[in-house]
Amino acid sequence: MGVVRGIMDLLIYDLSDAMVSIVAALLGGLIGYFLRGLVGRWQAEAIEKRAQARLDEVETEAKAILKEADIKARAEVVKAREEFEKTTKVRRKELQDLDERLSLRQEGLEKKSETLAQKQEDLQKRDAMLANRRSEAEKLAAEAQARLQRLAGMTSTEARKEIFKRVEEEVQGETAGLVRRLQEEAKQTAEREAHRLIAMAVQRYAAHHATEIMTSTVQLADDDVKGRIIGREGRNIRTLEALTGVTMLVDDTPEAVVISGFDPIRREIARQALEQLVADGRIHPARIEEVVQKVEEDMKAAIIQRGEAAVYDLRIQGVPPELIAALGRLKYRSSYSQNVLQHSIEVANLMGIMAGELKLDTTLARRIGLFHDIGKSMDHEIEGAHAKIGAELLKRHGENPVLVNAVAAHHADVEPESLYALLTSAADAISSSRPGARLESKDIYVQRLENLEAIANSFNGVHKTFAIQAGREVRVIVDPDVVDDTAAMQLARDISRKIEQDLQYPGQIRVIVVREMRCIEYAR
């Protein structure tokens, strides 16, 4: 029993301690909760205060910005009002000035109107006076006419016819003289303008004066190579001649082979093929056929390329391939040692310059100049003059009729139908006859000038002779005591005929006979 009570006391003591602990824990939790709530309230109040302070700052800044904007807006309004008032004042002043000018002009018009009215009234009075005088004059004229008819024995119709006849004769005489004078002035002006135009074209077009000489000679290192060119029993040279259509002269010139042929392109193919064979060293019929075929293909490409280059340099468009090939073949043609393609390009440039001065189509002029000698690319294949052959070729390809006529007429084979045809003849003559265009040695050139002077000096009365303009003009100074004006004209004709008979020259030579009589006396 005592043990049981002790155990129960122990249990009650333990339970009391546990309850105390639980109560303490509950009190601690409650205290912590209240403390946490209190701290949170303090923090919230601090945050609210900071937010309120920031809000106050922002509100203050917004008020400052609004105030500044309001000040600027008022300033802009004031400025705009001032500008408007200023503009309005200026405009008002302009309107006032305009109103004053209109008032002055109206006053002037009113004064002019009054003056015109006064003048009209004066004119009416004068018309009335003139009408009276006219009637009086008609009466007097009728009386005078009747008196003249009685004295002359002629009616007014007969007298009018006689007067008209005399006036007509006088007018015809004066008209004939005027026409003759105008013709002379037009001739002098046209000749002077033509000289200026040609001189300007020649000066503006700077072309090379050296002519291009096409050679058909292949140089060899030594004569031993000729044996390989000929081949066994001549099979190599026969093959080469048969494939190229030329004749090769091997034994005529030391260390050289001369190629002879009518077709310049075939002659050029043979030359290039022989040079390649000699450089390669392998010369036999199979190799010859291979090289000749390759050179022919290269030649075709080179011809097309040269024609295209000429067309491109002259800025000409729409040229058919056949005409381009014909132009390229002109590279291997020459006329009096002058390369035909270079000559055609030069004529095209000269025509373009002269056409520009005459306000003509420069593109058409250059096209005509380039095509004017295109017939020479096939005149060895077709019978006829190269101008006619070229004109027919261009006509087949649909070229401009003006161009076709200019090409056909540039050697006077047909009548020229346009100014372009005359320009073509002039440009062709300039290109062919200018110094250095065609091969002529210095000795031959000097000899020709001396011959011209010798022919002129052979006539009686000639004091001195000068051959100028590269032999294109001869000026003859005569003795005025021996040769009069009539004889001077005859002398110029005789000298020109003598030159035509004794000399060979391209183009024409102008002969000028100068006669001057100076009478000098001294007053003492």
Image (cartoon, helix red, strand yellow):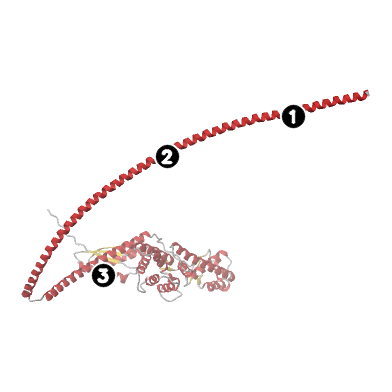
For the residues bearing labels 1 and 2, Cβ distance under 8 angstroms: no
Residue 339 locus on image (x, y percent): 43, 66
Closer to the eye: label 1 or 2: 1
Work out whether mark 1 precedes mark 2 in sequence or the reverse, and give the earlier one.
1
Q: Up-down: is 15 above or below 334? A: above
Whole-angstrom CA distance, mark 3 to mark 2, is: 98 Å
> Residue tagged by mark 1?
29
Whole-angstrom CA distance, mark 1 to mark 2, is: 69 Å
In terms of depth relative to the viewer, which is nearer, 401 or 352? 401
Residue 76: mark in rendering: 2
Q: Secondary structure at mark 3?
A: helix
Residue drawn 53% across the image and 34% down it: 59
Closer to the eye: label 3 or 1: 1
Name which residue type carries label 3: Arg
Whole-angstrom CA distance, mark 3 to mark 1, is: 151 Å
In terms of depth relative to the viewer, which is nearer, 30 or 296? 30
> Residue 367 vs residue 61: left or right?
left
> Residue tagged by mark 3?
493
